[in-house]
Amino acid sequence: MSFEKTARAATAIDELAESYVAQSLELSPGLVTVTGLPGASETQFDDYSPAGLAAQAELDQHTLQQLETLTPQDETDRITVAAMQERLGLAQELYQAAEFGELNVIATPLQEVQQLFDLMPQESNADWRTIAARLQAVPQALASWRETLTLRAQSGPDTARRQVLLCAEQADNCAGKSSPFIDLAERGTAAFSELGTELADGVAAARQAYGELAEFLRTEILPQAVESDAFGRERYERRIRQFVGAKVDLDETYEWGLTELARIRAEQQEIAHELYGAGVSVAEAMERLNQDPQRTIHGTENLQRWMQETSDQAIAALQGSHFDIPAPLQKLECMIAPSATGAIYYTGPSDDFSRPGRMWWSVPEGTETFATWQEKTTVFHEGVPGHHLQLGMTTYLREQLNTWRRQLCWVSGHGEGWALYAESLMAELGYQEDPGDYMGVLDSEQLRTARVALDIGVHLQKETPAEFREISPTWTRDVAWEFLRSNLAMDSSFLEFELNRYLGWAGQAPSYKIGQRIWRQLRAEAEARPNFNLKDWHMKALSIGSVGLDVLRAAL
């Protein structure tokens, strides 16, 4: 059976979801940029102030109240109701608990304001005029966020001192001589010299605003910050539901993470022996892989070319055999991001596919050598059959799913869990048969598994594993650092960024592996039924869209 897109008449529940999307787009110029849907002007940013947050919370509450008055007409409606009640209901719960004004190194207005420029069209004179105008709006955006940061500092929850200092450094970078805004203006001026003054003025305003933000963080927020990185069980349980969309037994999951980590280490040792013979350690095998010229890429241009070739080959190989990939999704652009954070990420296509899905690699400054044995699985994670297929499918299903289901409902445990499942699926299907490449699969999985134990351990302040107990009887940043170094053969700068991310963005990092675990459980349940077909199951699951994993379980 091949996947077919079927039209469906809109219902009252779809109309409510569409109304919610339209109002959200008027409240969020950033959402307009991310989705490519019409709404508020892209010369502006979201209102990050308490008033702006209250407006979104009021919309959430009103939509939930209206939802209760409507009757589902079909299975699609029933899933929409369950998903909106879960997502918007949790958003209300987080808002009532004052879980806003967070400082972390990856997912706050500090990063969003700068990264939105990467997604804006940059082809025409009009595109660059919009960019110049939005640069002028950066001061107001960051000023509105400072209001929320001040409220949180006064009323709680606590903010960790470490995150304040790290965010101040990031703000310094956006304000300094290596600011990504400078490169942005140079590219615009090179294309349209008549806009040089406008762009330069906008960059000056943006850089000054970030400099003022850095000073504000150090002088106003830092004195009220706390030393502890831990979120605590009550806050952490909400975060896990936020990122996984499922109720999770945290204590069982912590123990499972440690057990799973031991399994992966044993399998890595077997691969090391297969590659280089008995007596070769995993660390030594990885070092040899890193030194192998056949597995090494030099320069970002060659990296981009290799990413694109690997992605194109995967799409061609999987189309028709393991997935039905719609024509608009058979194009994926692999990009080098202008920023230099070290992050690798995917941005979905615009709603009309005029902007294709893109995989971005933000290469740290000075990094010129890349190991393909580690990164091949990353291409599958971000591209096909990972995020590009998953998110692109929901965008593609315009006639079947409402816009909220396709564009606004994103659950990390569903999305990142699927992408990690996609990595292991490619190995299962024979696309990672080379032992070095499979070592990369295990290396990636080891990172995601280590996150489970580390994240839960730190934020619940659980008892330290025996081999690290001399450092501290309970999980701390120092224990977490030694745990990462002992389990992951990765560059220290990468591990440091990762650890800082876990400490400040509680619950997100373990959602990958927890999500993969639940995806595997759902597949095993389906395989036990008569007439199971893997391709059909994949396409059915993907056609539901990104929903909480408890909602997905019920839907399947």
Image (tube, rainbow, N blue to C red):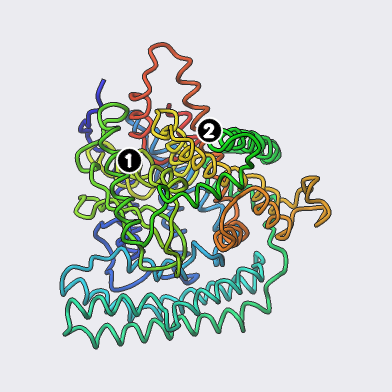
Which residue type carries mark 1? Leu
Q: Residue 42: which quarter of the image?
A: bottom left
In this picture, is 4 found above or below 411? Answer: above
Q: Residue at x 67, y 41 (%)?
A: 250
- Residue 146 got which mark? none
First in sequence: mark 1 vs mark 2: 1
Between disc 1 and disc 2, the foreground one is: 1
Mark 2 neighbour density, 10 Å: few (under 14) some (14–19) many (20 or more): many
- According to the picture, the residue beneath numbered tag 2 turns out to be 518
Q: Position of residue 401 (x, y in %)?
A: 29, 39
Q: Nearer the viewer, residue 295 or 324?
A: 295
Q: Secondary structure at mark 2?
A: helix
Mark 1 — residue? 389
Q: Is 156 in front, or is 523?
A: 523
The type of residue carrying mark 2 is Ile
Along the viewing direction, whichever of 136 and 469 lies nearer the viewer: 469
The quadrant in which the C terminus is found is top left
Q: Quadrant of the N terminus?
A: top left
Spatial CA span between label 1 and label 2: 19 Å
